[in-house]
């Protein structure tokens, strides 16, 4: 229990009175709770209008409802972060970073061909000119200023070129012309205002234009095919030029080579003799005999002693009656033969030695008429057995020993010749 001090007369002392603040709270507590709830609700509702977040790379232009409208002073622009404004004012956000838009434009070339050009425009806004841009044009400046202006300039520039130039060779030139022309037009256009807050600002100081790129061009299919065929024929013509140049160089090379061969032959021919050629022929014969392939080597008996080369059998051999068959006995009773001639290539055979076709002749010995068989042309291939036998007979027969002459036996003399 708590002990209380007693008064001298034995009674309890009087209790202390509560403070004024406590008595006010005790008396007005319900009303205070209601007021706080209302204020909290109002703050929650008005917070989006009181606090505005400016994203990175952007800036806000303040518009005062009761303070003269747009604040044109660039120093009062709201930078990045959380910014508080009065709920009856507004803050407009503008992007200061590099922007890119892509638009499709229709144009007509100088030769009347309709084409579709897809262009990409890259630009950026100037920070100090944003309040003027907001008041003169507004947030929808891309659709009101950039796209129509670039489209008009693109049509104007493309109308100076043919469809082939736009499609193939002049694309970079067109891009540069559109950009330079756009900068000139922006310099000519001014944003002006008269009155208390007057200004005169060039559009070029508001927008910084970086590039005007031509991404794609669409021409009619027939025009595209014609351009491709023309380009193909151009490169074919260039190919023929290179071919002609190559053949000219090849002709010069062959001429120089021929001159070198001629000089070589002139130099070498002075040191070539019959002995040197015979020695080279002997070496070739030795190498041929040492080969492991199956072969038949025929050593002839010409003056140089070189082997006989099989071939050129279509040449007519010289007429001879003793090489294949013996002659009739002459007045001396001896049989004569003809020696085999060395085989020569056809291109080295003199014209006088070539055989001529035989004609029919008449015999005058016995009064009877005889005909000589006409020689048939002989081909090199296929070789017949008769050709091979005749060839070997011409080579081997002259080396055989001549037959001894047959002694003529004495005949009986006629009775008229006997001595009487």
Image: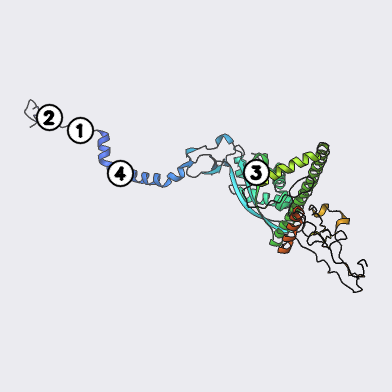
Dot 4: within a 10 Å radius of its alpha carbon, few (fewer than 14), some, or many (20 or more) residues?
Answer: few
| Residue 412, percent from left and from top | 85, 67
Q: CA distance from mark 1 to mark 4?
A: 25 Å
- Give whichever of 342, 377 is nearer the camera: 342
In terms of secondary structure, where does tag 1 sit? loop
Q: Please, which residue is most extreme toward the bottom here?
A: 368
Q: CA distance from mark 2 to mark 3?
A: 94 Å
- Give whichever of 288, 138 is nearer the camera: 288
Query: Which of pointers 2 and 3 indicates the residue nearer the eye?
Result: 3
Q: Determine which residue is flagged by label 2.
A: 13
Query: Which of pointers 1 and 4 indicates the residue nearer the eye?
Result: 4
Q: Earlier in the sequence, mark 2 or mark 4?
A: 2
Identified at 84% across, 53% down, the residue is 349
Q: CA distance from mark 2 to mark 1?
A: 13 Å
**Vertical side of 374 occupied by 184: above or below:** above
Dot 1: within a 10 Å radius of its alpha carbon, few (fewer than 14), some, or many (20 or more) residues?
Answer: few
In terms of secondary structure, where does tag 3 sit? strand
Dot 3: within a 10 Å radius of its alpha carbon, few (fewer than 14), some, or many (20 or more) residues?
Answer: some
Q: CA distance from mark 2 to mark 4?
A: 36 Å
Q: Which mark is residue 17?
A: 1
Q: Which mark is residue 211?
A: 3
| Residue 402, percent from left and from top | 77, 55
**Vertical side of 335 occupied by 52: above or below:** above
Q: CA distance from mark 1 to mark 3?
A: 83 Å
In terms of secondary structure, where does tag 2 sit? loop
Quarter holding the N terminus is top left
Q: Which mark is residue 380?
A: none
Q: Determine which residue is flagged by label 4.
A: 33
Identified at 47% across, 44% down, the residue is 87
Question: In the image, 29: left or right of 76?
Answer: left
Q: Earlier in the sequence, mark 1 or mark 4?
A: 1
Q: Please, which residue is most extreme toward the front here?
A: 420
């Amino acid at each position: 229990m708590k002990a209380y001090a007693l008064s001298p007369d034995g009674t309890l002392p009087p209790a202390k009175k509560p403070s004024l603040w406590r008595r006010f709270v005790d008396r007005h507590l319900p009303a205070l709770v209601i007021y706080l709830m209302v204020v909290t609700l109002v703050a929650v509702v008005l917070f989006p209008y009181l606090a505005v977040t400016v994203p990175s790379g952007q800036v806000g232009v303040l518009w005062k409802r009761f303070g003269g409208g747009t604040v044109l002073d660039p120093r009062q622009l709201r930078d990045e972060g959380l910014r508080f404004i009065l709920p009856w004012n507004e803050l407009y956000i503008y992007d200061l970073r590099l922007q890119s838009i892509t638009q499709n434009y229709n144009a007509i070339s100088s030769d009347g061909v309709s084409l579709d050009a897809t262009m990409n425009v890259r630009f950026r806004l100037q920070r100090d000119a944003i309040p003027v841009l907001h008041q003169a044009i507004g947030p929808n400046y891309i659709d009101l200023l950039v796209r129509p202006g670039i489209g008009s300039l693109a049509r104007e520039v493309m109308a100076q070129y043919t469809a082939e130039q736009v499609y193939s060779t002049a694309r970079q030139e067109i891009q540069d012309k559109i950009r330079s022309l756009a900068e000139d037009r922006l310099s000519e256009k001014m944003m002006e205002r008269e009155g208390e807050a007057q200004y005169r600002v060039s559009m070029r100081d508001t927008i910084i234009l970086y590039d005007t790129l031509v991404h794609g061009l669409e021409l009619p299919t027939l025009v595209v095919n014609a351009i491709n065929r023309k380009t193909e024929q151009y490169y074919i013509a260039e190919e023929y030029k290179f071919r002609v140049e190559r053949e000219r160089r090849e002709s010069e090379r062959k001429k120089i080579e021929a001159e070198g061969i001629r000089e070589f032959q002139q130099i070498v021919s002075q040191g070539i003799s019959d002995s040197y050629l015979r020695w080279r022929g002997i070496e070739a014969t030795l190498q041929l005999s040492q080969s492991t392939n199956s072969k038949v080597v025929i050593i002839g008996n010409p003056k140089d002693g070189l082997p006989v080369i099989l071939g050129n059998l279509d040449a007519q051999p010289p007429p001879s009656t003793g090489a294949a068959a013996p002659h009739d006995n002459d007045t001396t009773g001896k049989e004569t033969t003809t020696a085999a001639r060395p085989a020569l290539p056809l291109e080295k055979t003199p014209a006088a030695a070539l055989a001529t076709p035989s004609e029919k002749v008449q015999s005058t010995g016995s009064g009877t008429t005889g005909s000589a068989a006409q020689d048939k042309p002989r081909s090199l291939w296929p070789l017949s057995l008769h050709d091979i036998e005749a060839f070997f007979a011409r080579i081997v027969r002259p080396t055989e020993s001549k037959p001894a002459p047959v002694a003529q036996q004495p005949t009986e003399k006629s009775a008229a010749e006997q001595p009487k």
